[in-house]
Amino acid sequence: MSRPVIICTRGSALALAQSNTVLAELQRAWPDREFELRIIKTTGDKLQAASMAQPGELLPKGLFTKELENALLAREADIAVHSLKDLPTELPEGLHLTATPPRADVRDVLLFRDARSPVFAGRIGKTTSEGRSPFFGRPDAGLMALPAKAIVATSSTRRAAQVRAVRPDVEVVEIRGNVDTRLRKLVESDAFDATLLAAAGLVRLQCFIGGKGELRLDLRLSPQELEGFKAPPEGVLATVLEPEVMLPAVGQGAVALETRSDDEEVNALAAALNHRNTHLSVLAERAFLRAMGGGCQSPVAATARVLGHQVELRAASFREATPRRAEGRLPVAQAESLGTRLADELR
């Protein structure tokens, strides 16, 4: 291949952070090859006002992936970089999941306003026009620390279902927008009290939870490493939620490299970035989601990990009024069988 290898990605800050990391790793693995990044706007980027959580609302599959896959099939790009949890379990004919680099933190993070921050001086203790007292928290506050009738904003049916399961007295509302937009809405508005984001996304945006729970840029990094990254708004506290409290989405924290099945040369390049344990784990999770008959908008959750020669999977369904949970282990060669088996238990 004499021409550059084209890596396609969405244009969000998070997508670009992931794709630039992939580009750098590919360049490191293949220093004699040339790689270029191409930004493509997806359906999901165009439908920022569309609801992703309304029951019965029809949204197209592959909201954040279809246009990237079309570029692969048209040979306008060679490698598509996705957040794995956005990638449908059924891929178009001619494409496959070639590699999953090492996975980041799979957990979710609860974000809320800092009662100690001078940013909120004059707002604490006051009521809104609806007569509601907004929540301003302290470090390490979790879901149980939220007051009755607090408002939690999320676009994820999975997160919403788990919040309601733990705190049925809390109101859950929908929110759209990228990470920066959601954090600014949290700080600048009293419309909601807390929101939930993936820890991996915050880490990839070079955000760090300080010793007092404050969300800020990771000051352990050099100015060069922080170049291009935007500091989160002042006054945000963050609490990491363990999977026992908030079970992650299928594929959360993982990045997917998708290529054409018949492109042996590109497949060999991308495969250099594959992390075996991550790949085995997401195979189990995606098999569970596929067998459940759901997509990234489905109120199900699963997380897997490799333990020696076995893969362990924990899964849950929030489709019924009472959540249903299952877990199991099988040899790594049966990772997908494990996902299917747990789905059979929960359907």
Image (spheres, helix red, strand yellow):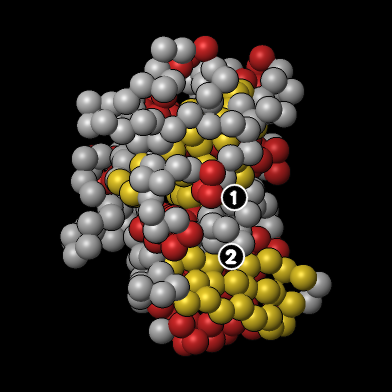
x then y, percent, for residue 316:
50, 72
Q: Secondary structure at mark 2?
A: strand
**Image side of residue 310 versus residue 61, left or right:** right
Q: Quadrant of residue 313?
A: bottom right
Mark 1 or mark 2, which has the lower sequence index? 1
Residue 259 seen in the current view: no
Please tell me which residue is depicted at 68% across the width and 66% down the height of the picture.
305
> Is 284 placed left or right of 317 in the picture?
right
Instruction: Give the answer, above or below, for where 119 lies relative to 338.
Output: above
Mark 1 touching mark 2, by CB under 8 A? no
Q: Nearer the viewer, residue 127 or 249?
A: 127
Residue 84 — which label? none
**Numbered disc 1: secondary structure:** strand
Name the outermost residue toward the right: 308
- The quarter holding residue 219 reads top right
Residue 90, horizontal then vertical, whole percent = 39, 70
From what the image shows, is residue 214 above or below residue 70?
Answer: above
Task: Check the picture and name the quadrant holding the C terminus.
Answer: bottom left
Front label number (1 vs 2): 1
Q: Return the residue at label 1.
A: 241
Tag 2: amino acid:
Thr
| In the foreground, 242 or 105 | 242
Q: Residue at x 68, y 74 (%)?
A: 312
Q: Residue furthest left?
A: 57
Q: Residues within 10 Å of mark 1 (few under 14, many from 20)?
A: many
Tell me how far mark 1 sits from mark 2, CA to CA.
Answer: 14 Å
**Quarter-wise, where is residue 210 in the image?**
top right
In the rendered structure, the answer to whether residue 157 lies left or right of residue 257 reads left
Q: Which residue is mark 2?
A: 303
Q: Residue at x 54, y 61 (%)?
A: 247
Q: Amino acid at mark 1?
A: Leu
Residue 156 spot, x, y in % from top left = 38, 53
